[in-house]
Amino acid sequence: MGTLIYQIFSSSALLSLGLYHLYFTILTFLKSPPSFSARPHHPLPSSSSRLKHLHLYLLLLCLLIAISHQILISSDSDPLIKGHTPVHLFSSFQSAALLFFFFLVSVALLLSETTTLFPLPPDAFFALGSALFLLQYFVSSSAASVQTSDLQAKCDSVSAQISAVVAFLCSILAFQPKFFIADVGLAAAICLQGLWVLQTGLYLNVEAFIPQGCHRLLDVVSGVESSTECDLEESRLRAVAILDLLFVVHVTIVVLIVMVTYAVMARTNGTRRLGSYEALPTIASDSNLIQMKALTGTQA
């Protein structure tokens, strides 16, 4: 139950971060498309300096909670629930170290925005983000390779692939900050990661979501919390196929969120024309025509 609560918390944090970044990315682009430039941080429109960076403070708090959770589960002494093995211990510390790196980069971003102690440009933070998400890809892939549960390994593998996409998009924005599609894709990928974390928690911890023919492993030493085992090969293949289908469903949901958000914001805020040609106002044309007729009558 503790793992499910933590995964719901992680999913909410990632989904909120992705939606926040998506909203302000689209808003910045609609205000002035030619001058658009991707930013790793969008301050809130507030007169107070603390409220402007409220989401960064919340992000730091979420990272501290996640680090504490990873350290606590690594030191649990009950092997039947948490799987307190050397592999589980080292993988938990590995995840905690990676989250600490994210915490350091977030602190550096906050210092860069609020003080002159750490004035790094946005492309440097995108490059750091690319490196960290690439490291997360290797951590998730490593976790998938040592799992005793086929379903947990599949979930970790998909999570690793999403992290690789985020790393790739961050690297693009580090060199091409005006690439609006890459910035929107970054926000969408973070939202997708949040939805997948929630799907993983439900699929591995809630009996109603565990596929038929599979069951949780809580009564053996080799099983850790959230581990599942399928009785037959056919059941395992069916469960993996359901996961693939659910991933496609989540991708579709994220695409719809992006399209609806852009359509609503474009209708609300309007879009500016691109290009040098602008149609002349009708009233101005009529006034010029009347003025020319008056001059013609005077000369006659």
Image (cartoon, grey):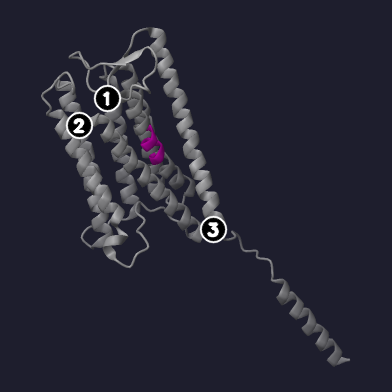
**Viewer-proximal residue among 30 and 248:** 248
Q: Which residues are magenta?
A: 190-196
Sequence-wise first label, 3 or 2? 2
**Residue 152 location, x and y as percent?**
31, 22
Element class at badge 3? helix
Q: Is residue 38 left or right of residue 32?
A: left
CA neighbours of label 3 inside 10 A, class few (<14), some (14 to 19), many (20+): few
Report the quarter where the C terminus lies. bottom right
Residue 299, labelled with which disc? none
In the rendered structure, does residue 192 fall within the stretch colored magenta? yes
Element class at badge 1? helix
Closer mark to the observer between disc 3 and disc 2 = 3
Sequence-wise first label, 1 or 3? 1
Q: Amino acid at mark 3?
A: Thr
Q: Label 1, label 3: how many angstroms apart (C-alpha)?
A: 45 Å
Residue 94, labelled with which disc? 2
Q: Main secondary structure of the magenta part?
A: helix
Q: Is residue 164 visible?
A: no
Q: Residue at x 38, y 53 (%)?
A: 39
- Residue indicated by mark 3: 268
**Residue 174 location, x and y as percent?**
37, 48
Q: Amino acid at mark 2?
A: Gln
- Residue indicated by mark 1: 142
